[in-house]
Image: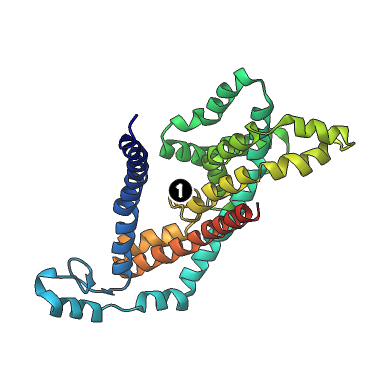
Amino acid sequence: MTDAAKPALRKAPDWGRRLVILVPALWLAVFFVVPCLIVLKISLSQTVIAQPPYVPVLDLAAGWPGLRDFAGGLSLDSYKMLGSDWIYLTSYLRSLAIAAMSTVILLAVGYPIAYGIARSPRRLQPVLIMAVFLPFLTAFLIRIYAWINILQREGLLNDTLLALGIVREPVVWLATDTAIIIGIVYSYLPFMVLPLYASLEKLDESLLEAAADLGAPRWKAFWLVTVPLSASGIVAGALLCFIPIAGEFVIPDLLGGSSALMIGQTLWTEFFQNKDWPVASAVAIALLLVLLAPILIYQHVQMRALEDR
């Protein structure tokens, strides 16, 4: 091979690497960044009875004067309303509280399932993973409506509790936070199990044997070896569950009550009932910033851990 051909071979992988990076970057720019910028612009607008229901509207044909008038019409009134109205603040806090509680329950339920699958024989693991996802091949709305039948006053859950003598009269489940959490845990369980299984499946069992040789009982080896080594799966599963749960709309709307709304319901109300697009967009942008915070913190911690190594 000549010396002239060697630089060409070195350049080829660089173009391939750039193309691999460029395709997902363009996808994110078109389907995430651009829509977010549009929503951000609407959140800085004013509500009017018109089509579209906000001003100012950017008119590129007007040139620089039109651009100047457009910039002058933007305001932070929608964000000021979010900070001054307890309805929005309560919705945010309620959503974050339910998301945090549901994530903790999902971790408590999902970790033993993922651990059991990871420690089962290799040939059975695909079958067990499929068993976790099998109920979710049914349409999402059908499964949530099924929970309405289960949780209603004369539903399967109350019939079972009455038959076992656990309760003396039917318990009110629907239109409560308990019903919302039950529906969320049921719906998001695979999103917790899968990353946990991915981290536990790669666990080196010789480390547990070494801990046993050093005199550590099983429970201590589990807390000191298994749990720390599966921390990446715990964080990934928690983020995969917490972020979408905080903005959940369907489950709270069907299983919860109307007395206390989550932020997803508030967002829907502002868009489709009140027709207040600027306030609804401000709610969405604020929620996005709140949910980006744990992701950025996690990335910062990961980068610091890599630098320390």
Q: In x, y percent, where is residue 111?
A: 66, 39
Residue, x 73% and y 37% (percent of image)?
A: 165
Residue, x 54% and y 65% (percent of image)?
A: 93
Q: Quadrant of residue 220?
A: top right
Q: Is residue 153 left or right of residue 139?
A: right
Residue 13 or residue 223, whichever sits in front: 13
Q: Is residue 72 left or right of residue 111?
A: left
Q: Which residue is mark 1?
A: 254
Q: Is residue 45 left or right of residue 130?
A: left
Element under label 1?
helix
Q: Residue lying farthest front? A: 2
Counting other residues with Cα less than 10 Å from the Cα at mark 1, is it few (<14), some (14-19), or many (20 or more)? some
Q: Is residue 160 left or right of residue 226?
A: left
Residue, x 34% and y 54% (percent of image)?
A: 32
Residue 134 or residue 288, whichever sits in front: 288
Residue 178 or residue 126, whichever sits in front: 126
Q: In x, y percent, where is residue 242?
A: 54, 52
Q: Residue lying farthest right? A: 215
Q: In x, y percent, where is residue 273?
A: 32, 62
Q: Quadrant of residue 51?
A: bottom left
- Residue 46 versus residue 227 in the image, above or below: below
Q: Split into 4 quadrants, where in the image is the N terminus? A: top left
Question: How many numbered discs, if any?
Answer: 1
Q: In x, y percent, where is residue 228?
A: 71, 45
Residue, x 36% and y 75% (percent of image)?
A: 78
Residue type pointed to by label 1: Leu
Residue 251 in sight here: yes
